[in-house]
Image (tube, grey):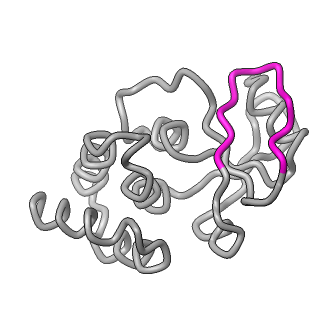
Amino acid sequence: MDWDKLEAATRRPEATICLLSALAHHDLTDAIPDALDIAIPRGTRAPLTEGAIRWHRFDPATFDLGREEILIPGSSQTIGLYSAERTIVDCFRLRASVGYEVARDATKEWLRRGGKPAELMAFATELPRAKAPLLQTLEALT
């Protein structure tokens, strides 16, 4: 059982796996996150936690974009998870903290698996800070 996911989900029902942790879930990175990346809506308080959880605050207007609920293995509890497309776009949007190479490499792997650039651009239109660097990367990779 993943206690960090369980703790995040019980302390914040809107908790959503994001960034490097979501890339790892979607098998789009070789990096092993040192903490569970969890998004919560901006304006909400990050709870004190025992586990290795890194809280991120995302805009409430776009918080549910590309969000789904998954079952935490070994429990009856669910937690939010951003789609691979939303996660890649978020990594470009937050490339200063995540690293441009992480976003680029995830995009490269996603495309190799048959991902369509138009799907990424649809998310980038909703999250504009990612649009220019994502477009440059897609042009270089395709």
Quadrant of image for the N terminus: top right
Please identify the dominant SS of the magenta region: loop
* Of the pair 134 and 69, the residue shown nearer to us: 134
On the picture, is 139 further left or further right than 5? left
Please provide percent x and percent y for residue 47.
86, 37
Q: Residue 139: say if magenta.
A: no
Q: Residue at x 80, y 42 (%)?
A: 46
In the image, the segment drawn in magenta is 45-56
* Image quadrant in which you'd find residue 82: bottom right
Please provide percent x and percent y for residue 56.
64, 46
Q: Which residue is drawn at 75% across and 37% down?
A: 72
Q: Which residue is drawn at 69% across and 29% down?
A: 53
Please provide percent x and percent y for residue 121.
34, 75
Quadrant of image for the C terminus: bottom left
Please provide percent x and percent y for residue 19.
51, 45
* Of the pair 108 and 102, the residue shown nearer to us: 102
On the picture, is 29 further left or further right than 87? left
Picture layout, residue 99 above or below residue 4: below
Q: Residue at x 42, y 59 (%)?
A: 93
Picture layout, residue 77 above or below residue 13: above
Picture layout, residue 105 above or below residue 131: above
* Image quadrant in which you'd find residue 73: top right
On the picture, is 68 further left or further right than 12? left
Picture layout, residue 4 above or below residue 139: above
Q: Residue 50: say if magenta.
A: yes
